[in-house]
Image (cartoon, rainbow, N blue to C red):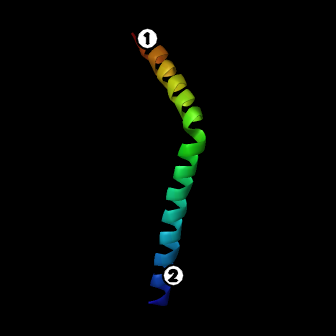
Amino acid sequence: MEGASTKKILGTLAAVAAVGGGFYLIKKGKKLLAGAKMNFALLGFRIHKMNL
């Protein structure tokens, strides 16, 4: 029973860390992400044009 509760606590901490890290990355990397999305869209568009 002790092992299960420890796993639960660790899982909760991991989830909290993942969510917190995600929010941090969203805040810090919004401009970077926007740039990456633009590049990805352009790249996808180029590949799409090449296939046609």
Residue hosting label 2: 6
Q: Position of residue 22 (x, y in %)?
A: 52, 51
Q: Is residue 9 above or below residue 52?
A: below
Q: Nearer the viewer, mark 2 or mark 1?
A: 2
Residue sitting nearer the eye, 16 or 42: 16
Q: Secondary structure at mark 2?
A: helix
Asked which quadrant contains residue 51, the reply is top left
Name the amino acid type tagged 2: Thr
Q: Is residue 42 above or below residue 34?
A: above
**The N terminus, quarter of image:** bottom left
Which residue sits at x=47%, y=17%?
47
Asked which quadrant contains residue 17, the reply is bottom right
Q: Position of residue 30 (x, y in %)?
A: 55, 37
Residue hosting label 1: 49
- Kindly indicate whether the residue at mark 1 contacts the one at mark 2 (C-beta within 8 angstroms): no
Q: Position of residue 19 (x, y in %)?
A: 49, 57
Q: Secondary structure at mark 1?
A: helix
